[in-house]
Amino acid sequence: MKLRHTVACLALALAACKAPTPPAPADKPAPAATPTQPAAAATTAAAPANREQPTLAIDTLDGKRFDLASRRGKWVVVNFWATWCGPCLKEMPALSALDTMREHIDVVGLAYEDTTKEEMQAFLKKHPVSYPIALVDVYDPPKDFETPVGLPTTYLIGPDGKVAKRFLGPVEPHDIEAAIAAAGGPAAPKEG
């Protein structure tokens, strides 16, 4: 009985951050159905994006343009998230600190949900971050990245513009810094 209760609770927790498959309006086809990825722990994959060297040029909520190509020479963390995703909200302060504290790392948040610019700006007033946030159309997500099937989904892009690592589920700064060091980038500074 206890095992059945634990399994049921785990299933509910994993379902909480499943990326939405929105109903298709009359003028847009529904996104393709894909299997759910667990959101409880970060995992990695070797071939994370649809392209080895993805492009991403998107308007951010602060009225600026984020262009991945202009970030060559830096490590870039591309984080798909949503306001309704508990693990996403939990990792936001850590990603913000990483963006602020590491000169060689830039972070961009891609809000993967059907909401308005005004609603997102109101949300970010209560949950501020140091990195730019862009709204992603769930019916037309960035073509060079896989459509998220679970949130958060995070990509680490190397200074050469190529995908170095993909994380499924929550990610900690030490995971990102370890992936950077493993790919030949600078190691994280020692604490203490």
Image (cartoon, rainbow, N blue to C red):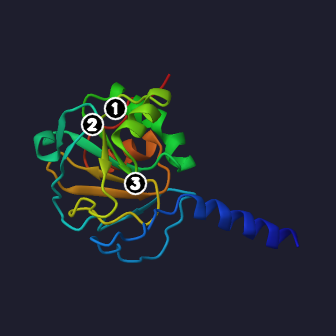
Residue assigned mark 1:
99
Determine whether, in the image, residue 18 is placed left or right of residue 66.
right
For the residue carrying disc 2, how many other residues have a C-alpha within 10 Å: few (<14), some (14-19), or many (20+)? many
Question: Circle 3 is placed at which residue position?
Answer: 114
Residue visible at 42% across and 39% down in the picture? 119
Which quadrant holds residue 47? bottom left
> Which quarter of the figure is the N terminus placed in?
bottom right
Q: Residues within 10 Å of mark 1 (few under 14, many from 20)?
A: many
The amino acid type, in three-letter code, at marker 3 is Asp
Task: Residue at 46% x, 63% y: name it.
Answer: 20
Foreground label between 3 and 1: 3
Q: CA distance from mark 2 to mark 3?
A: 25 Å
Q: Which residue is mark 2?
A: 106
The Cα–Cα distance between marks 1 and 2, rounded to whole angstroms, is 5 Å
Between 180 and 8, which is closer to the camera in this rendering?
8
**Residue type for callout 1:** Asp
Say what amino acid the circle numbered 2 marks: Asp
Q: Which badge, 1 or 2, comes first in the chain's sequence?
A: 1
Q: Are marks 1 and 2 in contact (CB under 8 Å)?
A: yes
Q: Check disc 3 and report its element: helix, strand or loop.
A: loop
